[in-house]
Image (cartoon, rainbow, N blue to C red):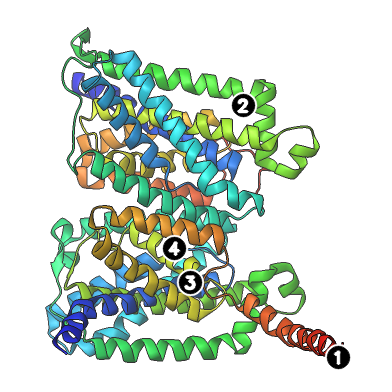
Amino acid sequence: MQGLWDFWAAYRSTLAFAIVNSFLALSTYAVLSAGILSFATVTYAAFGGFLGARMVLATGIDPMLTLPAAALAGAVLSYLVALIFLRLESHWMALASLALILITRVIVINIPVVTGGVNGMSVPLPVSLELLAVLIALAALVFWRLSVSWYGIAAQSVREDTAVASSLGIAPRKIQTIAFVISGAVGGLGGMLLAGALQFISPDTYFVNIAFTMIAGVVLGGSYHWTGVIIGAAVFTALPVIAQAIIPEFQDVANGIVLLLIMIFLPRGLVDPRAIRLRNKFQLPVAQAIKDTSSTKLDI
Amino acid sequence: MDLFFEQLINGVALGSLYALFGLGFGIVFATLGILNAAQGTYASWAAIVALAAAEHYKLPFIPALLTGVVAAGVIALLVDQVAFQPLRRRGKDMLGALITSIACWIILDSLAGTATGHNSLSFPRGTYPSTMYHLGTIPLPVMQIITIAAMVAVTVGLHVLIRHTRFGAAMRAVGWDQTAASLGGVNPRYVVIITAFIAGSTSGLAGVLGGITTHNVSFMLGEGLMLKGFAAVVVGGYDDVRGTALAGVALGVLEVMTSQYLSSGLRDGITYALLLGFLLLRPRGLFGSLTYSRA
């Protein structure tokens, strides 16, 4: 019993980080599901995180209030980003969002009044695992409802083919703007939760590596369904911890190799709705056929 | 005024490093269509290998430099064949290649950290030329001259290779469309392998020279070069090596001047603001061609 308790204590924080990372991954997925590769999630997260942390430190308000504030801040910021970025072609947008992350770090360093500058700031905002569990359940519910809504279907068509989508009466720009705002809200919230989970944030907390980790998590889990995103983020968070337990010296190398293998052998990710659909579709006739042949053999 | 000229030369030398690195990065992006996150590690590894060659095997400067450069080319070649070739066979997919390049970045970065013992090493005195020339009263270290000369030579060489040779035409054809290129009698696999090697060794050269001049050989070396090299490629226009070279030098000068006369805190800010500005207002960069687009 004690062993089980130790295990739980040791991996409790891993679970917390898995949930936090799921939020950031969902934010990346929100735009990816409308056909946009954007790393700007990191910027929304930084905005939400620093704003929320500073709000608590400066005014001493209830930390719970900072969560909607961070989400709102992220949403507003992402709307502004969408206004500018959506004019760009797809791969220029990906590059521009990378540039945005680089600039975010410079801005964070240069306004020490708000962010603590290079030294960062500690965040007296404990985020309980229960709260995270409730929030991720809520986020899952939202993404599930979105995926079957009119918006979800429109986003999917925009992702598959923008020209076809607009010929069907869908305004791609509008759908993509909505996707950006969803991404911003989820990203801002995720940034705040990350600050709470880490208890300390600095300019390096929200930088390129987090963007790469997130996009890797999304693609690893499967970028065609929101459950895949959560699973991917969880796997990508757990992987270093597991690798650390098995081969401590080369944990990063092990991560990289696993990521490489998954991308090469499972290019559509761990959760692939198309594969599942195909399997379900073919299962029945195949099973029937096998039954038929076996019964023929019996006859002979 | 002397200070200004001294800083100008510093800026050009620094910018030459960005330009050299950016050349490698840009070729991969233009020809292979990959945003290669692992490119920075080629530079780190080139510096580490060159350092090992100079320190442990007592090679003189030029052979040590070449060892590092070739090592980076070979690593780039391996990364391409292991991480990008399987995806390439299945068809164009920028996102997939980005992820596998991130995987290689993680692997090579952490191995580089292990190789250097997570320290910042530097080339010991005497393993590289350290003569100091003087232009009037302005000091002119020979390593800066070598860096600038190397950048100019590589830029001219690559420009001639890409624009005026048959192989260069094949490279551009593969960059445009692999299937069409192979219908035209080009062997894409061969072109891709050579291109990956050239790109890796160019970035590796930046790594070795940067490791010597900044006295910093570690995994951080490549990361710094990559962000600035990326900026140089975008600002210059990634399908023209002259643009990358010019933009790299300009960024270097701008950075040094900013930290000298404005504030060192703004140093990175100016580069990245310029990068974002170009992406938004003139995404094809200074020299990029108008019709170039990749689906």
User: Would you say residue B262 is visible in this rendering?
Assistant: yes
Q: CA distance from mark 2 to mark 3?
A: 40 Å
Q: Which quadrant is home to the N terminus of chain B?
A: top left
Please check whether the numbered discs 1 and 4 fall on a single chain: yes
Q: CA distance from mark 4 to mark 2?
A: 33 Å
Is label 3 in a helix, a strand or a loop? Answer: helix
Between B104 and A20, the one lying in front of the other is B104
Type of the residue with mark 1: Asp
Q: Upstream in the sequence, badge 3 or badge 4?
A: 4
Which circle marks residue A221 in the picture? 3
Which circle marks residue A216 in the picture? 4
Indicate the position of residue A48 as horizontal and vertical percent values.
30, 74
Please check whether the numbered discs 4 and 2 fall on a single chain: no
Is label 1 in a helix, a strand or a loop? Answer: helix
* Location of mark 1 (residue): A299
**For residue B240, above or below residue A235:** above
Indicate the position of residue A247 as horizontal and vertical percent values.
27, 58
Furthest-right residue in this view: A300
Is label 4 in a helix, a strand or a loop? Answer: helix
Identity of the residue drawn at 32% across and 89% down: A133
Which circle marks residue B162 in the picture? 2
Q: Nearer the viewer, mark 1 or mark 3?
A: 1
Identity of the residue drawn at 44% across and 19% down: B152
> To which quarter of the image does residue A120 belong?
bottom left
Type of the residue with mark 2: Ile
Type of the residue with mark 4: Ala
Type of the residue with mark 3: Gly
